[in-house]
Amino acid sequence: MTMNNEIQNIINNQINAELQSFYAYLGMAAYFDEQSLEGFAHWAKKQSEEEHEHAMKFYRHLQERGGSVELKALEPVDTSFNSVVAAFKAALKQEQHITKLIHEMYDKAISRKDYPLQQLLNWFIEEQVEEEDMVQTIIDQLERVGDSGEGILMLDRELKSR
Ligand code: MG
């Protein structure tokens, strides 16, 4: 079975976008590690692993359907931020961008009557709701503690057990 070219291209673009997210969370982890915020660093590394898994889901989908995987270059990412909350705000922006891409893929999967891709994307649509909600919750908590070092250390300890 050969795959529709347009569908193959958008899946390859999404593999790149998920790996770019992997890279962005790794950049956040590097910043937190430098600040000795081990809980935040742990959280960001877990997130980056999840993004790698997302890329692999699309990779497998292509392989299973006789498509060809294309691995495009990644952009450099920030490893330094003005504050902890600034790092999380950048993460939220990244997630919102991914959500938009997933929704655009879904539109395409519907218009091309690509049922297997729709099925795969249903999982991602739900996952993006959870991702955005989780990052927004951490931003809300960080904004509540403000510049309090004690508050930030408390949240850092909380995220260590994730
Ligand atoms: Mg993802």
Image (cartoon, rainbow, N blue to C red):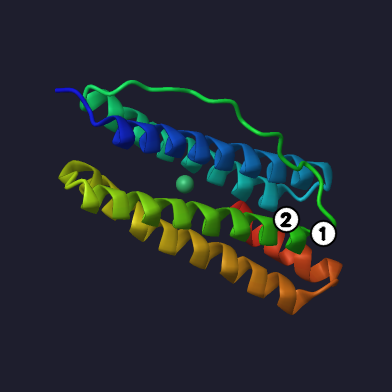
Query: Counting other residues with Cα less than 10 Å from the Cα at mark 1, is it few (<14), some (14-19), or many (20 or more)?
Result: few
Q: Amino acid at mark 1?
A: Ser
Task: Tell me whether the residue at label 2 lies in contact with that at label 1, contact meaning CB atoms closer than 8 angstroms.
Answer: yes
Secondary structure of residue under mark 1 = loop
Q: Is residue 148 above or below residue 106?
A: below
Residue 2, which numbered label?
A: none
Q: In which image quadrant can residue 26 be found? A: top right
Task: Inspect this view and state whether residue 13 appears.
Answer: yes
- Please tell me which residue lies in front, 25 or 150: 25
Image position of 162 (left or right of 125): right
Q: Which residue is mark 1?
A: 83
Image point (38%, 38%), residue name = 10
> Is the CB–ligand 1 distance for label 2 below 8 Å?
no
Image position of 137 (left or right of 61): right
Task: Inspect this view and state whether residue 162 appears.
Answer: no
Q: Which residue is mark 2?
A: 87
